[in-house]
Image (cartoon, coloured by chain):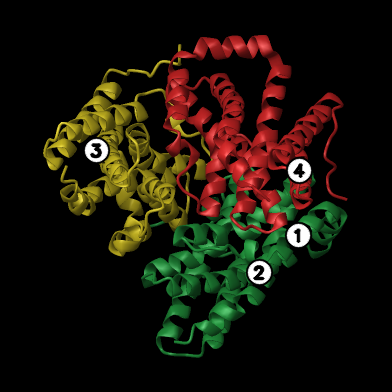
Chain colours: A yellow, B red, C green
């Protein structure tokens, strides 16, 4: 397993997910009529919260946002000047656009977080959990900060379950020695697909039996 | 002080507390109509949240649930298939059964967490606080995740105060050189007793003078 | 830059901020009718929560409240016996007194946290963010624990923005080689002034453009 390749590509790949999640935080903060400070804090927490929680639990430093300060500065500038743009995007892309961007973020972050956890020596089941934590807990922090019950818990549309399934596929593909980037691509794509199918066909995770 | 004995026994003793707390998380998530994902997350947070927060604050790794992955897998399977069983237990045991299981968890986790904090070189008062954090803050995380005001704060039935008193008794007994297991047993039993008496006689922690 | 001087003085200077924030936590907990345990937990979280989050993110130990156990014991005693005193202070000082105490805490903690982050090798922008985290996130934890939407997000009166501006002034003054204590004093005073002017003239941080 040459997981170094994935490690080196992580920063670039994560950028796509960060932007998708950040927009979802921005939109929420705008809906709640927060000022520019609130928009930045909620955007930051949504984009970096999951990865930061993952890294705290893994005792891993420096954080992505410390090493790549430019992302934070870009996010900061957007939170100051992008209010109208956010509202515009929110109207234009509507729910469908947001769901797709969010699904992309979910797919990417799940696999990169799983890879990071495996790299840190976590056992398989825990590594798959870390995939979900890194991808889906930015949204949990966003919801707790906004005083809402986390959608991860209250909304039974498949979300964490897609991430969890994809994380196991990634672990399996790696186990059989596939090329790292291929594993990452396939497993991420599967998560995006599962998520979009779940939304399209209004599937619901069953309450436990 | 031969606290190594307690350290070695910790994993076994903590299992009892974990099950008790986990059930309390499961029941809450079922009441809130969460799906299987929500049941797992809330159960996990209730069972392992306090100990994880304690270990983050003490900068202690690996977490219990990383070292003992099997507990997490068991919890995961239960969250998938135990829905009916949880509802059944909730109806059969009613409030009384839950209070007893929870009191057991409180007693055990408080003392093990206090022992861990002493081992990490914390001063006495802080160690007693860590006892309360390890035992009672899983419930706080459960409540915050569910969007409720933490019972630890809003419910004046003695809970953290029983834990805190028992932690000091444990510290005192250790100070006088008693056998570790005896200290653990006596102090845990005292916490369970205080808690059950508090519930039985509807005692309330006074608002401060 | 001889930032060792600031480091040595930190404990003394932080004490003033701790007391101010602690009182704000106490008052909130009393308003919510919490018992003595709740008063202690909310007071502790408000006073030490921001600095603790900062230190977890920076992977910095021991925490202030572990090294200076006496503050925690004093806070504990106050939470037991100071109920009437808190209510009295709340009536006498009214909103104005609280705003001044809180502004002092904001000014002091922002600059000490920024100094700590610079010391830990954080880049400038991130260090300024750490200033805001250390100063303002105790209040966020207080609000989340009490089940309220954080004032930092919902209230557009300038708070985090004053802290952020002051942090940059501190970084600038240090950059030009000014004496550490002078930097600390000037930048803290600026934050206090900005905050009080903001409250006095009912300024509001604009929603982003």
Q: Are marks 4 and 2 on the same chain?
A: yes
Q: Chain of mark 4?
A: C
Q: Earlier in the sequence, mark 4 or mark 2?
A: 2
Q: Residue at x 30, y 43 (%)?
A: A113
Which label lies toward us, 3 or 1? Answer: 1
Q: Write down the residue under mark 3.
A: A104
- Residue C17's tag is 2
- Residue C73's tag is 1
Q: Is residue C30 visible in the rendered structure shown here? A: yes
Residue B92: give x, y in percent of width and height. 66, 9
Q: Secondary structure at mark 2?
A: helix
Compared with C78, B2 (above or below) is above
Task: Report, in whole angstroms, how far the alpha carbon at label 2 lies from the one at label 3.
Answer: 43 Å
Q: Is residue C209 visible in the rendered structure shown here? A: no
Q: Earlier in the sequence, mark 2 or mark 1?
A: 2
Q: Chain of mark 3?
A: A
């Amino acid at each position: 397993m040459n997981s170094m390749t994935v490690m080196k590509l992580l920063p670039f790949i994560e950028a796509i997910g960060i932007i998708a999640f950040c927009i979802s935080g921005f939109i929420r903060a705008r809906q709640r009529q927060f000022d520019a400070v609130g928009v930045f804090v909620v955007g930051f927490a949504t984009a970096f919260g999951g990865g930061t929680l993952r890294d705290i639990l893994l005792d891993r430093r420096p954080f992505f946002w410390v090493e790549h300060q430019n992302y934070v500065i870009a996010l900061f500038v957007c939170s100051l000047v992008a209010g109208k743009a956010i509202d515009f995007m929110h109207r234009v892309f509507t729910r469908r656009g947001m769901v797709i961007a969010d699904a992309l973020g979910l797919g990417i972050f799940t696999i990169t977080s799983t890879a990071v956890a495996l790299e840190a020596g976590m056992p398989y089941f825990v590594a798959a959990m870390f995939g979900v934590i890194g991808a889906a807990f930015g949204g949990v922090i966003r919801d707790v900060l906004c005083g809402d019950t986390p959608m991860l818990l209250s909304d039974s549309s498949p979300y964490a379950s897609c991430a969890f399934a994809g994380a196991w596929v990634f672990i399996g593909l790696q186990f059989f020695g596939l090329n790292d980037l291929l594993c990452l691509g396939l497993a991420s794509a599967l998560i995006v697909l599962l998520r979009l199918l779940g939304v399209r066909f209004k599937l619901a995770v069953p309450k436990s039996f």
